Image (cartoon, rainbow, N blue to C red):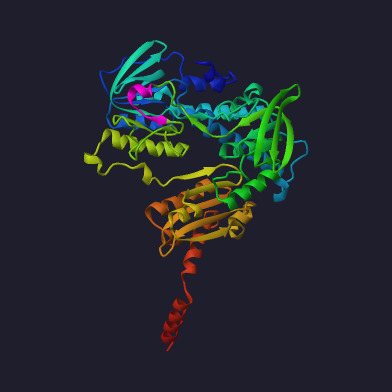
């Protein structure tokens, strides 16, 4: 394995050895290449794995190439390890808050950060079986461990440990993903820093940590570290946190993060880093005040850079820029034989987005439509997402500002969790559900939920947007008591708003007539 791969699986314990045995087996022998493949996929993250395995299950001859770790960011350095760490941090907070529920915990109870990370690595290794090279080979995919590079418009060379292979294809898919961006901060490179690709190799808790970027990655991990007791300074260039989210929702999360001990330095300017004998010195101007903070570690979560280098896109006739590979609505590149999916070409940097895009690639690459009629279209995707802070923020569809830009009139309704019985009983009543409904219809155009389990709750609104409307949710029985009742309560606000006084007057006359 390369040095970069080894850094992702530190420490060398039994769990990481199992992970590597699954997703980058050292004894792997690349197969002899077929004369021609229906589909060759470069990159075995979520987009590549789904594209390859579904195509193979349909009977296509498929090759899958991965030079690092199968499973990509999600398994190795993203969703899986971060949620394992976040869950442990929440357990520790629940224990500290036990007295609020009438529970008395003996003094002196503590935690072991090393054990927290060991648990994470153990569960990651267990989950990695789903993305293993051996499993995909058994499912009919020719798995190649090595670097893939286009030699022409229909040919890829794989450099593997047992020699090179030349793969010819009818169609190909580029799913090489993205990596953490390095912001141009003076002194950052010299001082050294962590990203999501290295932070999960920690075995000891940093007592002081600076987090640069208050997007989803920065907020999730800043809160988790603070809950374990780190002194966390969170630096964000814009005002507040999660600048792309509903402001009211982000404000609720921001206040909780402050209560957890996170120091937010927003509107940060002139950020500089200097390595000193006492640690890594961060200086930043925030709201016209200069802050000078020394930390043990710096975590950078400020954007993603697409992995377009070194794969021969020029030789393949595939155009790209700083935002990634250029694709049309079918996810087809400038070479009509080659498609792309996932973070390499999408503004949605989510595992579930990569999954959905993989399905589109399969339909359009393997089942082309005459004249392009009836093709699967990425522009029609109804994309929900969630940031797993506490509380969580989940969103789907439009925000109010989006509708205003498009000239669409909305009716917006908000229902607070402090009026939902289950939220009150759980002590999780800070938050709300908000829906945006197209005026004059029951069509839901967007929704935001900020709640303890917002990521689970947003799915009902996503389904209603795709296959129903506000009336569908209003007419659906919800079990009591659940937090998801807030979805019905918020659309009932829309229903009540459309029960006008004139309608009531008519009904009163009808009921009076019935009493005669």
Asked if residue 284 lies left or right of residue 383, the reply is right
Residue lying furthest top = 163
Examine the rendered structure and indicate whether residue 440 appears above or below residue 141.
Answer: below
The answer to whether residue 317 is magenta is yes
Query: Can the viewer see residue 8 in this picture?
Result: yes
Res 479 seen here: no
Residue 312 drawn above or below residue 490:
above
Q: Nearer the viewer, residue 262 or 516?
A: 262
Magenta range: 312-320
Residue 302 is left or right of residue 106, and the answer is: left
Residue 257 among magenta residues: no
The image quadrant that residue 217 belongs to is top right
Residue 345 position within the rendered picture, expressed as x and y whole percent measured from the top left: 42, 34
Residue in view at x 54 percent, y 45 percent: 244
Q: Nearer the viewer, residue 316 or 354?
A: 316
**Residue 76: % across, % down:** 51, 28
How many numbered callouts?
0
Residue 227, position as x, y percentages in the image: 68, 38
Compared with residue 308, is residue 387 higher up or lower down, i.e. above or below? below
Image location of residue 453, percent across then percent down: 55, 47
Judged left or right of residue 215, residue 462 is left
Q: Residue at x 44, y 45 (%)?
A: 383
Q: Residue at x 31, y 14 (%)?
A: 32
Please name whichever residue, 152 or 301, is drawn nearer the observer in this view of the structure.
Answer: 152
For the C terminus, the image quarter is bottom left
- Pick the front one: 1 or 133: 1
């Amino acid at each position: 394995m390369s040095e970069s791969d080894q850094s992702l699986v530190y420490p060398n314990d039994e769990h990481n050895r199992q992970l590597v045995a699954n997703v980058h087996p050292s004894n792997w022998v690349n197969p002899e290449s077929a004369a021609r493949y229906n589909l060759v996929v470069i990159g075995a993250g979520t987009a590549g794995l789904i594209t390859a395995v579904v195509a193979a299950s349909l009977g296509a001859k498929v090759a899958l190439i991965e030079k690092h770790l199968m499973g990509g960011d999600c398994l190795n350095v993203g969703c899986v390890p971060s949620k394992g760490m976040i869950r442990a941090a929440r357990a520790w907070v629940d224990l500290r808050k036990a007295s609020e529920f009438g529970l008395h915990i003996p003094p002196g109870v503590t935690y072991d950060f090393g054990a927290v990370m060991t648990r994470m690595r153990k569960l990651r290794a267990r989950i990695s079986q789903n993305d293993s090279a051996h499993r995909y080979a058994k499912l009919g995919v020719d798995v190649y461990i090595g670097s893939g590079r286009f030699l022409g418009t229909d040919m890829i060379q794989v450099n593997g440990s047992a020699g090179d292979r030349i793969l010819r294809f009818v169609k190909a898919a580029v799913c090489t993903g993205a990596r953490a961006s390095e912001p141009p901060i003076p002194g950052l490179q010299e001082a050294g820093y962590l990203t999501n690709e290295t932070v999960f190799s920690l075995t000891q808790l940093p007592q002081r940590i600076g987090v640069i970027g208050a997007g989803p990655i920065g907020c999730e991990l800043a809160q988790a570290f603070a809950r374990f007791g780190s002194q966390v300074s969170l630096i964000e260039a814009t005002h507040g946190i999660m600048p792309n989210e509903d402001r009211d929702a982000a404000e609720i999360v921001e206040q909780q993060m402050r209560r957890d001990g996170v120091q937010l330095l927003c509107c940060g300017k002139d950020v500089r880093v200097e390595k000193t004998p006492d640690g890594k010195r961060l200086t930043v101007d925030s709201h016209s005040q200069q802050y000078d903070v020394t930390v043990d570690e710096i975590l950078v979560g400020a954007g993603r850079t697409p992995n377009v280098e070194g794969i021969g896109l020029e030789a393949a006739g595939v155009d790209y820029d700083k935002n990634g590979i250029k694709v049309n609505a079918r996810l087809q590149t400038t070479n009509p034989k080659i498609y792309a999916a996932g973070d390499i070409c999408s503004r949605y940097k989510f595992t579930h987005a990569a999954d959905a895009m993989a399905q589109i690639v399969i339909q359009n690459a393997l089942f082309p439509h005459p004249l392009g009629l009836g093709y699967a279209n990425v522009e029609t995707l109804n994309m929900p997402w969630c940031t797993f802070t506490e509380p969580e923020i989940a969103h789907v569809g439009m925000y109010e500002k989006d509708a205003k830009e498009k000239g669409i009139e909305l009716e917006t309704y908000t229902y607070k969790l402090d009026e939902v019985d289950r939220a009150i009983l759980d002590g999780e009543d800070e938050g709300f559900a908000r829906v945006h409904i197209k005026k004059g219809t029951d069509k839901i155009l967007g929704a935001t939920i900020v709640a303890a389990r917002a990521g689970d709750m947003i799915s009902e609104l996503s389904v209603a947007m795709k296959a129903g409307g506000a009336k569908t949710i209003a007419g659906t029985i919800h079990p009591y008591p659940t937090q998801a009742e807030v979805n019905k309560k918020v659309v009932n606000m829309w229903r009540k708003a459309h029960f006008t006084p004139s309608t009531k007057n008519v009904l009163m006359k009808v009921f009076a007539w019935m009493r005669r």
